Amino acid sequence: MSIRSEFLDGVIIIAPLALAATPFGLIFGTEAIRAGLAPAEALLMSAIVFAGSAQFLAIGLWSDPAPWLALGFATLLVNLRHVLMAASLAGKMQQFKPWQRALAAFVLADETWAMAERRALGKPLTPAFYLGAGGTMYVWWLIVTAVGTVIGSYVSDPVALGLDFAFPCVVVCLVLGFAKGFRTVPIVLVSAAVALLTQRLIGGTWFVIAGGLAGMLVAMLLPAPAADGPAREH
């Protein structure tokens, strides 16, 4: 296939997922304005960070002055999954030059990773296809963020519209996406308990970091899932 065909394939395949992300981009732009960011600042965050869950987390913790250390560490914890996604794609990028790999890492998102993995099952993963998919997600996220900032300028009461519930919904969806059977239950429970206790005793935004670290610690201490043994002979 030609470079143009590969690029268009990436655009077409990612288009439904980009449209599905539209409400989140609109809500983020609106919530960013409500948190006190200027439209240009909200758009700059989308352009530099390009990670919806991390951006919602930042907006949820935003204050004046901004808790930079807590914000940076909390968003780092949220985005650690990108390391695993990048590692899974690394072996499928034989056709990528070093600078193309760097660009691919920048536009990496959950949707782009999923479509790239699916593509690699049947065809070689090419830079043109990846750029079509990842570039489309990136540009569309900027567009809907910009539209959201305009809408946010005219929304006087986001609570009445339920927009204040956007961040908790994103977190719940993120947790459910990581769920791997009942083994996830103690991780979530301990993380939530530590976060609530930290919020009660210390306050501020450190409960996010404390809960995240507690969940990671429990995950490391839990025994690994038992591998399926050989079938018994009857």
Image (tube, rainbow, N blue to C red):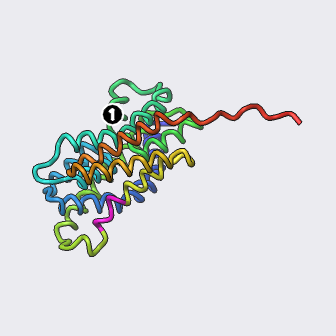
Q: Quadrant of the C terminus?
A: top right
Residue at far front of view: 201
Query: Does the rendering let one see residue 79?
Result: no
- Find residue 127 and report its image quarter: top left
Residue 164 in magenta stretch: yes
The magenta segment is: 163-168
Residue 90: x %, y % from top left: 45, 28
Q: Position of residue 98 (x, y in %)?
A: 35, 24
Q: How many marks?
A: 1
Q: Name the foreground residue: 49 vs 197.
A: 197
Give the answer, above or below, for where 230 lies relative to 181: above
Q: Residue at x 42, y 47 (%)?
A: 190
For the point 26% across and 43% down, the residue is 49
Provide residue 132's location: percent of width, then percent of height: 40, 43
- Picture coordinates of residue 162, whole percent (x, y): 31, 70
Magenta region includes residue 197: no
Look at label 1 and name its amino acid.
Answer: Leu
Residue furthest to the left: 65
Q: Is residue 172 left or right of residue 150?
A: right
Q: Is residue 61 left or right of residue 216?
A: left
Task: Give the residue furthest to the bottom.
Answer: 160
The residue drawn where x is 35% and y is 34% is: 105
Magenta-highlighted stretch: main secondary structure?
helix
Closer to the camera, 105 or 55? 55
Q: Is residue 111 left or right of residue 55?
A: right
Classify residue 116 as left or right of residue 181: left
- Residue ID for mark 1: 103
**Element assignment for label 1:** helix
Note whether residue 206 is visible.
yes
Residue 72 vs residue 99, the one in the foreground:
72
- Residue drawn at x 14%, y 48% as measured from the top left: 66
Label 1: how many Cα within 10 Å (few below 14, some 14–19, many 20+): some
